[in-house]
Image (cartoon, rainbow, N blue to C red):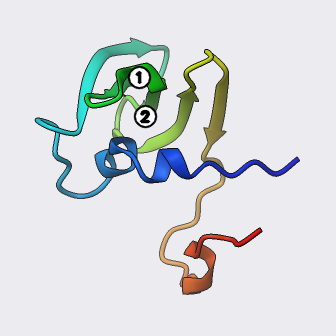
Amino acid sequence: MLCVSSHVFGSAYAAFIYPDPDLANGVKVLKIERVAESVLVTIQDRRNPNQGQLILVLDTRTLELRAWQVIDDKGERTTVRLESMTYGVPLANTLFERPSF
């Protein structure tokens, strides 16, 4: 099943991962915690706090993004893990275009 949500990309959550995030107006950091070899940062959209939360999972040593979890307004959790990453590989621009259904 393919599920595409435009909410996450159009919200303050997506802005949080940009090089210069607007933390004052966009997102609220709810919690920062260390779990095993990870740092978990839980954030929420300041303007729409009832729409769920985003948890960023960072490597403890390097603070590289390793995963993220989206918790929607119904409490459903979706986890995306970044594994076997390769750096410096050219990618086609079409990979970042929004699909039309």
Amino acid found under the numbered disc labelled 1: Leu
Q: Which residue is mark 1?
A: 40
Residue to which mark 2 is pinned: 59
Decide which of 61, 82 is in the foreground and name it.
82
Q: Secondary structure at mark 2?
A: strand
Q: Is residue 95 positioned above or below 41 on the image?
A: below
Check the picture and name the quadrant holding the C terminus.
bottom right
Kindly indicate the quadrant of the structure image that contains residue 59.
top left
Mark 1 vs mark 2, CA separation in Å:
9 Å
Q: In screen coordinates, is 15 left or right of 84?
A: left
Vertically, is 58 above or below 50? Answer: below
Classify 10 Å Cα crowding around label 1: few (below 14), some (14-19), many (20 and above): many
Q: Is residue 67 left or right of residue 81?
A: left
**62 lies left or right of 7:** left
Which residue is rendered at x = 48% and y = 23% of the image?
Answer: 52
- The three-letter code of the residue at mark 2 reads Asp
Instruction: Identify whether 79 is placed above or below 73.
Output: below
- Residue in the picture at 34% in, 38% down: 63
Q: Quadrant of residue 47?
A: top left
Please count the marks in the image: 2
